[in-house]
Amino acid sequence: MSRIQDTFRRLKTENRKALVGFVTAGDPDGPRSFEIVSAMCAAGLDILELGVPFSDPTADGPVIQRASARSLAGGTRLQDVLAVTARLRQDSDVPIILFSYYNPIFVYGLTRFYADAVAAGADGVLVVDLPPEESDEMTTRWPGQDLALIRLVAPTTPDERMARIAASASGFLYLVSMTGVTGSGGLDFGAIGRHADKLRALANLPVCVGFGISTTDDVAAVAAAADGVVIGSAFERLIEEHLGREDLAAILADRVRQYKAATVGAKQQGSSGTRAPEKPA
């Protein structure tokens, strides 16, 4: 059983949904970035999405764009992200998903990437700009199935295409909560529930929802409609707002604990979920 599968099965027995946290590796710098991700995992993060910085992150909003810029300015490259993964794996069993655009992986080498990612202890990869129709170029170079390929599904994805995407995915499915980029606001929890219900009926995989989730009320409402909640911009915003703080890692760990508490006991509501009143997390 993979670490991803084991995590979702354990959470189900605990009546809890997965808290999936994204941060850009190397932000704000190498040493502090490792402190941050290590503290977040120790604080109870269920799955870590470790972002590979990229110069043109078109799916991401300004907060994550600036995080990528800070990381790249510090010299972070894909091999550095893999090194962080290997170092984390020495002390943590938290599943690690490498979140990247296709260009860094292509330049690194498709077969080499698979081998090095698996050796480092990564559990999956999400390539945000690689559609299923073009992903064979990458996956046919992979000699095994030890790296889950996380697929994205948009709220505008037609049913037939949704089924094709679900059939080729592994690990879990990432349901985008809205049209737009990461960090956007305006969540419609009823629509999220309906889309999650439809996707879950098509795939024998957990469904995690991300984009635009920032408050503990957001987390609780989305957790009632999905198997997991993905948070990225809110974590990166915390980093950006506290760049000069020596206790930066502790600040991120405390926010993980707040979000995690909101996933406990969230019962599946699907399309009946309603918009929760928002409050600062």
Image (cartoon, rainbow, N blue to C red):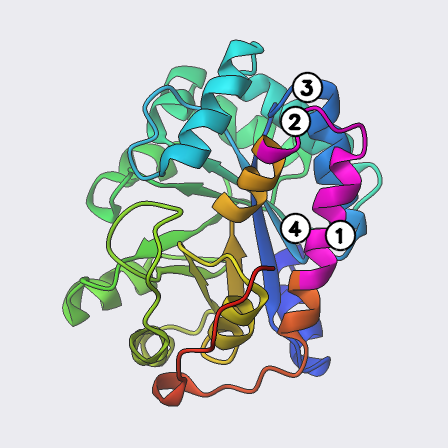
Residue 211, percent from left and from top: 40, 54
Tell me which corner region of the image, top left, top right, bottom left or bottom right, holds residue 271.
bottom left
Secondary structure type for disc 2: loop
Q: Position of residue 230 (x, y in %)?
A: 51, 57
Which is nearer the N-term, disc 1 or disc 4?
4
Q: Amino acid at mark 3?
A: Gly
Q: Secondary structure at mark 4?
A: loop
For marks 2 and 1, the one nearer the N-term is 2
Instruction: Kindly identify which numbered label has been placed on residue 243.
Output: 2
Residue type (three-letter) at the residue carrying disc 2: Leu
Determine contact: label 3, label 4, CB under 8 Å: no
Question: Which residue in the protein does label 1 denote?
Answer: 254
Disc 3, SS: helix
Q: Comparing marks 1 and 4, which lies closer to the viewer?
A: 1
Kindly report which numbered mark, 3 or 1, lies closer to the viewer in this rendering.
Answer: 1
Residue 242 drawn in magenta: yes
Q: Measured along the vertical axis of the image, is residue 53 above or below residue 148?
A: above
Tag of residue 51: none
Precedes in sequence: disc 2 or disc 4: 4
Q: Which residue is mark 3?
A: 30
Could you say where residue 215 lies in the image, as x and y percent from the top left? Answer: 54, 62
Q: Which residues are magenta?
A: 241-258
Determine the residue positioned at 80% across, 34% down: 247
- Callout 4, which amino acid? Pro
